[in-house]
Image (cartoon, helix red, strand yellow):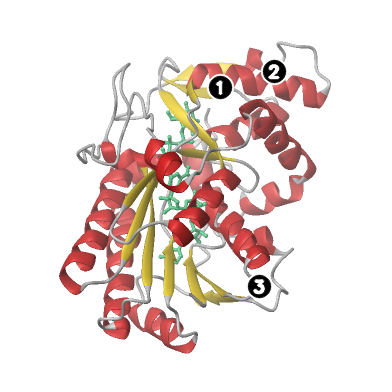
Amino acid sequence: MKNLLVTGGAGFIGSHLVRLLVHKYPQYRIINFDALTYAGNLENLTDVDQAPNYVFVKGDICDAEAVRLALKQYEIDTILNLAAESHVDRSILDPLAFVRTNVLGTATLLNEARSLWRDRTDVLFYHISTDEVYGSLGAEGFFTETTPYDPRSPYSASKASSDHMVRAYGHTYHIPFRISNCSNNYGPCQFPEKLLPLMIQHVQAGKPLPVYGKGENVRDWLWVVDHCTAIDVILHKGKDGETYNIGGNNEWKNIEVVYLLCELMDEALGQTPGTAAGLITFVTDRPGHDLRYAIDASKLKHELDWEPSMDFREGLRQTIRWYLDNPEWVVRVLSGEYQAFYEKQYAHR
Ligand code: NAD
Ligand code: DAU
């Protein structure tokens, strides 16, 4: 392994992963291939963008020629595919954008890798996916690597399709591949449309905190850097053709996580306890809202010796601190193309 193409490296998880790889593997060349959509922000990487083993290429994974050029020019032997449309609410408003990037884009990458790599065995297509492909759980049980796919939103259906394309190309054209399916990430640099950073912004602005439905839906929260260390372990110690589930073993009802966040926000802002929670407002539920996701990550623990390291309270404290210390980052990402969507989707709440 020498030349790694990380697609979506300017996004939330991608930027943490690029940072980890650039620091830990000076002998590798890390090519960040990103279209810089509303969710991609090179400011996430200003601390590593001068590193000698880092290169940024602005490109769209649906653009076969751009992908081909990058694969050839940098003699790519490993692809880590994180580029995606990633927000479920957006997928409900504009499903075809998700089909384009997540399905067509992944297929385009696979197709170009297939042409270039032929039957090479010293290469790897590592696809980063989500636990949402498995559908929704009731009160009991966990998703394992053998849980049948049952995606229920345009986002999760597009990610499930991309997983299927990766397995199909692997099986048909013998491209060595790995897939990991991860639970909800949190941490610095997450676009402020996702639950936790959205709530942090609204508490600061004294705006209502929109909890969908009754707030009974359950998510399994994982510190973003723990996700990246899992990817690193799978990249270096995983087996070709295998799937690995990644989770935090950290289930919370949305309403509970919002109360905890409010408590920590009051603490961070020096407010009277209960001030932030007073902003909680129950709003119309997300259409088709999956009730519960919960990951069984025991395969990763037993086979590759990976476990999450961050305590949730501490991770939330660090996340809040980062957003409070970086208001200009928030202003910049909330401007431009994102603003129209923001007005339509959130401004009335
Ligand atoms: P994000 O939305 O923050 O970032 C996506 C990145 O992909 C951005 O930098 C964007 O510019 C880039 N991108 C989008 N379309 C592109 C295209 N056509 N060509 C090239 N680049 C493009 O997403 P994220 O939360 O960092 O998620 C990264 C990956 O991890 C996604 O594949 C997502 O499905 C998966 N995932 C996310 C989570 C989570 O909780 N955020 C959990 C499990 C899996
Ligand atoms: O499970 C992994 C997935 O987690 C990733 O694949 C996705 O890319 C990522 O966006 C995330 O999806 P969710 O839909 O779970 O994340 P989101 O932050 O949008 O919402 C978390 C929960 O909070 C969900 O049950 C919906 C709810 N919610 C969300 C928002 C934005 C609210 O109640 N209010 C809100 O304003």
The x and y percentages for residue 11 are: 54, 56
Measured in 3D between alpha carbons, the distance from the residue under mark 1 to the one under mark 2, in whole angstroms, is 10 Å
Label 3 belongs to which residue? 26
Instruction: Tell me if mark 1 has few (under 14), some (14-19) or many (20+) residues whose alpha carbon lies within 10 angstroms of its own.
Output: some
In which of the image's four quarters is ligand 2 placed?
A: top left
Q: Nearer the viewer, mark 1 or mark 3?
A: 3
What is the secondary structure assignment of the residue under circle 2?
A: helix
Q: Residue at coordinates 76% horizontally, 46% vertically from top-left?
A: 326
The x and y percentages for residue 113 are: 32, 77
Q: In terms of image quadrants, where is residue 57?
A: bottom right
| Closer to the camera in the image, 67 or 295 | 295
Left or right: where 64 falls relative to 31: left
Measured in 3D between alpha carbons, the distance from the residue under mark 3 to the one under mark 2, in whole angstroms, is 41 Å
Can residue 246 be seen by looking at this rendering?
A: no
Disc 2 marks a residue whose amino acid type is Glu
Left or right: where 255 falls relative to 145: right
Q: Which of marks 3 and 2 is in front?
A: 3
The reply to whether callout 1 and callout 2 are in contact (CB within 8 Å) is no
| Closer to the camera in the image, 341 or 150 | 150
What is the secondary structure assignment of the residue under circle 3?
A: loop
Q: Earlier in the sequence, mark 3 or mark 2?
A: 3
Left or right: where 249 falls relative to 273: left
Label 2 belongs to which residue? 263
Q: Residue at coordinates 47% horizontally, 29% vertically from top-left?
A: 249
Label 1 belongs to which residue? 257
The x and y percentages for residue 90 are: 40, 45
The x and y percentages for residue 169 are: 22, 67
Q: In terms of image quadrants, where is residue 67?
A: bottom left
Instruction: Tell me if mark 2 has few (under 14), some (14-19) or many (20+) residues whose alpha carbon lies within 10 angstroms of its own.
Output: some
Q: Residue at coordinates 68% horizontally, 47% vertically from top-left?
A: 330
Q: Which of marks 1 and 3 is nearer the N terminus?
A: 3
